[in-house]
Image (spheres, grey):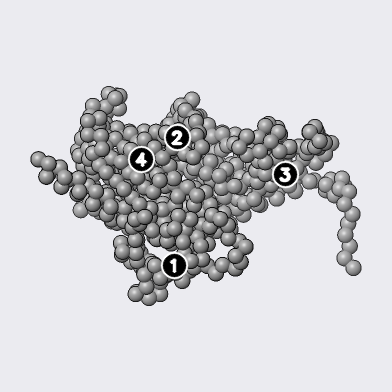
Amino acid sequence: MFVWELSDTSANCDSFWIRRGRLGSDTGTLDQTHRALLPSYSSPLTQSRHEIYSPEGLRTDGRRWNEIRNFDCKINTHPTSADGSSYVEWGHTKVVCTVDGPREPDNRQNTTDRAVISVNVNVASFSTETRIKRQRNDKRLAEMNILIRQLLEEAVLTKLNPRTQIAVNITVIAQDGGLLPACINAACLAMIDAGVPLTDYVSACSSGVYSNNALIDLNTLEEQDVPFLTIGVIGKSDKISMLTLETQLPMASLEPVLATSLSGAHAIQDIMDAAVRKHGKHRLERK
Amino acid sequence: MISINDRKFLTEALKVSKRLDGRSMEEQRPMEVTFGSQFGHVELTMGKTKVVVRISAEITKPNERRPFEGIFVVHTDIGSMASPIFENNHQSEQEIMISQVVEKAVRRSGALDLESLCIVAGKKCWEIRADVHYLDFDGGLVDATCAAVMAGLYHFKKPDVDVDGGAVTVCDMEERHPVALSVLHLPVSVTYGLFELKNDETNEVEKVECVLDCTAIERQVQNAEITITINKNRDICQISKPSGVSIEGYRIVELCEKAFQEALKVTEMIDKALKEDEEMRNKGNWKALLSAENDRYEK
């Protein structure tokens, strides 16, 4: 399995730690810090079949703490049905996103001095292991729509297209953890494909903590067991634009988890950039 | 809506660390809790924000997927009575976000022990319902709701039940002491407004100011909001920062530390109010008279 080694790209993350003065020395990397924090496992009896993080430093799917799952993305997957489209496969999470616009708004009364973004996330009922029928007004989905919309509004130069609407449709085909970040990354790629002006890449990543160890990019199994948070970042800055934490997390763990997810989000931006450039090259060659 | 002049005045004042109501940047409006005559009736005021919470309990069938657990629901219906910015019978985006944060802070943080609400597994359980009414709005809805619901849960007592095989008898409150709920911890929400302070000449953002407990007017000017829910055991139950202005990670960590200090104050306030109410109800020390327990003497 291809995994993206985070330690290569975590330069920003290191500086984050050093500035906070937690490392003690300027030479230490995030990697070493976490190795030092490895817990001492007392008894083999506590080990279950689904061990979240083994003493050897391996997770349930064989990843290390700093490895994100295979992030495979394509843009312009639906060239005829939408202005912009993308497909993101992040581990077993699969998301399709289409962007229509900037176009005439559905509701003419809603016209403002800037483009209005509308987001609609559609979760396929076969996307989870057990088939769940969604309620019609699912508040969690509504919240997710709002979170994605607000993050995109921050990155899109909406003032350049006044009195228009940009409709983002996201379809979730399969979920295995990291649903919100996958949707955000897919939406960013589709926006780029549609030619909507953005200030920079928008990316998101989740990470959790398991007995003093930060774990990046959790799958469903880990999300159920481990407290985690999701951040959304615009560009490669260490400023966090969106943050949601829904499970109880000890205060001491907040900082390593933030740092890890931040470097994860930056790594995702590199992969997305590579995919966009690859597509651009392909388009140029075809002409 | 706020006028351009008011907006300018407010931001200019923030630049010299002044707020309209004379508070400092990190000063929360004091909360005041009063309990009604019935168990689980709480009135909370925080500045001009006023919230009433009513906790009630009834026996229902548990969720099929969770047969050993009771049910706890929080109903937050923000109508136009609170403020004209909310509509009746229509959920605005702001309202969805508020109710979701309250839901995460109070319910999903596991503050109420759901397993203790089970009566007969898979057949009968208690459904605890918290109805939140907003009487007046001046910012800080999440903070006020969270504190009021938690105070209500601590205050509420449900009637005792007898289980004999499959038959469940609910005992009268007069006949037997009602039982308090098993509340595991007290999550406190603290909301900071983030303001982008721009340089007058260059129009570039000079710094991002974090202002605790914004009023309704300040809320209209703020560029982003971050709500941190934390308890006195230093567990962060929830953080919600929808987009808006970005902020560095270490500042979020700092905010959590400050939020923890605020949480301690709110916890203390609720504890004190509960104690006073308990003393008032126990006038004449009837509890000791009715108790069958023997005094224990130390020898």
Question: Label 4 lies in what chain?
Answer: A
Residue drawn at x 62%, y 34% is B64
- Mark 1 or mark 4: whose residue is earlier in sequence: 1
Coordinates of residue B196 in the picture (x, y in percent): 32, 50
Q: Tell me: A56 left or right of A150.
A: right
Question: Label 3 lies in what chain?
Answer: B
Q: Amino acid at mark 1?
A: His
Q: Which residue is mark 3?
A: B180
Give the alpha-carbon distance from disc 2 to disc 4, as whole Å: 13 Å
Residue A95's label in the rendered image is 4
Marks 3 and 1 share the same chain: no
Above or below, comparing residue A140 to residue A238 in the picture: above
Secondary structure found at label 2 = loop
Q: Which residue is mark 2?
A: A126
Give the alpha-carbon distance from disc 3 to disc 2, as whole Å: 43 Å
Nearer mark to the viewer, of 3 and 1: 1
Marks 1 and 4 share the same chain: yes
Nearer mark to the viewer, of 3 and 2: 2
Question: Label 1 lies in what chain?
Answer: A
Instruction: Using a 10 Å C-alpha cutoff, classify the residue at mark 1 as few (fewer than 14 neighbours), some (14 to 19) or many (20 or more).
Output: some
Q: Report whether residue B155 is seen.
A: no
- Mark 2 or mark 4: whose residue is earlier in sequence: 4
Q: Tell me: B183 left or right of A12.
A: right
Q: Tell me: A49 left or right of B55.
A: left
Q: Amino acid at mark 4?
A: Val
- Residue nearest the observer in this picture, A182 or B94: A182
Instruction: Using a 10 Å C-alpha cutoff, classify the residue at mark 2 as few (fewer than 14 neighbours), some (14 to 19) or many (20 or more).
Output: some
- Residue nearest the observer in this picture, A245 or B5: A245
